[in-house]
Amino acid sequence: MKNLILLVVLSGIVACASQSVVRQTQKEPEILTVLSDGTMVFRGRTVNEKDVVIYPDGFGGERAAIKVRVPLKPDFYRDTIRVQREDADATVTRN
């Protein structure tokens, strides 16, 4: 009886260990684009300027924190976003 239980437990452990799947997804960088007229675009959508905080990243560039609203949870800021500013002629001035 002990051998049967041991066999079942070991079979379960081996089955679970062989099922581990490592997913590697390439995330594209999150970029907030600030157009020359002041419009802010993130992931193809315009963002309200009162929901964005732009700050220096310490390496000569800028980062942004965007307010995220989730139903039934308090609002929070996502702060892993790079800022890219564009001139009137659509050339990038900063990353």
Image (cartoon, rainbow, N blue to C red):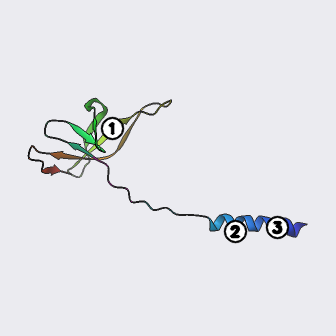
Give the residue at mark 1: 66
The number of discs equals 3
Circles 2 and 3 in contact, beta carbons < 8 Å: no
Q: Point out residue 20 in the picture as x, y percentages from the top left corner.
A: 59, 64
Q: Secondary structure at mark 1?
A: strand
Q: Residue at x 64, y 66 (%)?
A: 17
Task: Report crowding for label 1: few under 14, some 14 to 19, many 20 or more residues within 10 A (C-alpha).
Answer: many
User: Identity of the amino acid at label 2?
Assistant: Val
Q: Quadrant of the N terminus?
A: bottom right
Q: Which mark is residue 14?
A: 2
Which of the marked residues, 1 or 2, is nearer the chain's N terminus? 2
Give the residue at mark 3: 6
User: Identity of the amino acid at label 1?
Assistant: Ile
Q: Residue at x 9, y 43 (%)?
A: 88
In the image shown, does 50 or 57 lie closer to the viewer?
50
Task: Report crowding for label 3: few under 14, some 14 to 19, many 20 or more residues within 10 A (C-alpha).
Answer: few
Q: Give the distance between the C-alpha atoms of the residues marked 2 and 3, in whole angstroms.
A: 12 Å
Q: Secondary structure at mark 3?
A: helix
Which of the marked residues, 1 or 3, is nearer the chain's N terminus? 3
Q: Residue at x 25, y 32 (%)?
A: 49
Among the 4 quarters of the image, the one containing residue 68: top left
Whether residue 3 sits left or right of residue 58 in the image: it is right
